[in-house]
């Protein structure tokens, strides 16, 4: 599943590589990109109808909404393992088989930049420090035992994803990545990390914004506050037992 917003030069290259190098199918989730990415995705689907599907989103835009809608669609299409990856060629399709294989041994496999030192190519130091600091912060506040909790390159086992999608997920940017892992860990699902080399995009523009960073700083705190308190259901059960 590949969410796209203005990725017209990257998408055909990525989809071409996935079709050539793997046996997997592709679901493109486009948010009515003004640069015509959706049209390019339709052309790819017309060329490869058995392996490429396009979901054109019409409701409110956003990366988080796109992930959630795309994941539900992938499940409805019958996928047993669902990978999520960026369209900007940062996530190499050569890692897909290893991720899928790892997700067969666990519930979710994370393509990790920080498993063997730092494996990131072409990032400015400022960007790297932001990502490393964000990951440390998330680990510290939430206790998530994942080195690269903000990675958008993952493979989910269907049953695990269904479980996580039942949770009230609110984030929209990077925070969505660790929020979903947080729920996975809360439900004792098994998370494994697979080393990847992340390559900075060459074409197109990043959609990273101060809003996304702010959300990622706040979300670990609200997650901890929400889930340390007993849920309303648990309180109701306790009160019923007391009566
Ligand atoms: N459908 C949809 N896709 C989006 C949206 N924003 C970003 N994307 C896609 O999500 C993926 C990640 O976006 P990037 O801009 O590369 O963001 P990033 O990888 O977090 O940031 P960088 O590290 O700076 O590249 C890319 O495939 C984007 O095209 C959105 O609002 N809707
Ligand atoms: Mg990117």
Image (tube, rainbow, N blue to C red):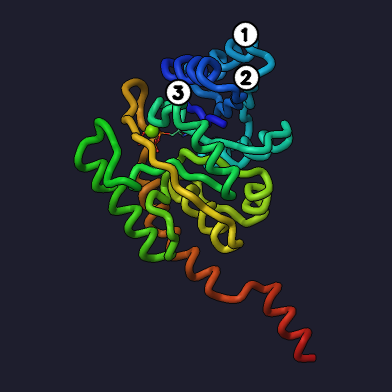
Asked whether mark 2 and ligand 1 are closer than 8 Å, the reply comes as no
Marks 3 and 1 in Cβ contact (< 8 Å): no
Q: Which residue is mark 2?
A: 52
User: Which of labels 3 and 1 is toward the front?
Assistant: 1
Image location (x, y in percent) of residue 116: 31, 46
Q: Nearer the viewer, residue 155 or 106?
A: 106
Q: Residue at x 46, y 38 (%)?
A: 153
Q: Residue at x 49, y 48 (%)?
A: 176
Image location (x, y in percent) of residue 227: 55, 69
Residue at disc 3, secondary structure: loop
Q: Is residue 208 above or below residue 187?
A: above
On residue 6, which mark appears? 3
Examine the rendering and report whether any part of residue 36 can be seen: no
Image location (x, y in percent) of residue 203: 34, 20
Q: Quadrant of the N terminus?
A: top right
Q: Residue at x 42, y 65 (%)?
A: 143
């Amino acid at each position: 599943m590949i969410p796209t917003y203005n990725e017209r030069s990257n998408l055909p290259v990525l989809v071409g590589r996935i079709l050539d190098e793997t046996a997997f199918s592709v679901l493109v989730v486009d948010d009515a990109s003004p640069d015509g990415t959706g049209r390019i995705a339709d052309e790819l689907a017309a060329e490869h109808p058995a392996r490429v599907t396009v979901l054109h989103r019409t409701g409110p835009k956003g990366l988080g909404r796109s992930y959630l809608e795309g994941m539900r669609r992938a499940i409805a299409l019958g996928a047993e393992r669902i990978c999520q990856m960026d369209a900007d060629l940062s996530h190499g399709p050569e890692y897909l088989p290893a991720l899928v294989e790892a997700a067969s041994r666990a519930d979710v496999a994370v393509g990790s930049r920080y498993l063997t030192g730092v494996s990131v190519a072409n990032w400015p130091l400022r960007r790297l420090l932001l990502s490393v600091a964000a990951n440390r912060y998330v680990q510290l506040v939430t206790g998530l035992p994942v080195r690269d909790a903000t990675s958008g390159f993952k493979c989910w086992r269907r049953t695990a994803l269904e479980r996580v999608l039942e949770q009230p997920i609110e984030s929209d940017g990077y925070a969505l990545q660790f929020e979903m892992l947080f729920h996975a860990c809360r439900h004792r699902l098994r998370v494994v990390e697979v080393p990847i080399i992340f390559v900075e995009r060459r074409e197109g523009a990043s959609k990273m914004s101060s809003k996304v960073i702010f959300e990622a700083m706040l979300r670990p705190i609200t997650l901890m506050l929400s889930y340390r308190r007993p849920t309303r259901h648990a309180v109701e059960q306790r009160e019923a037992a007391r009566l």
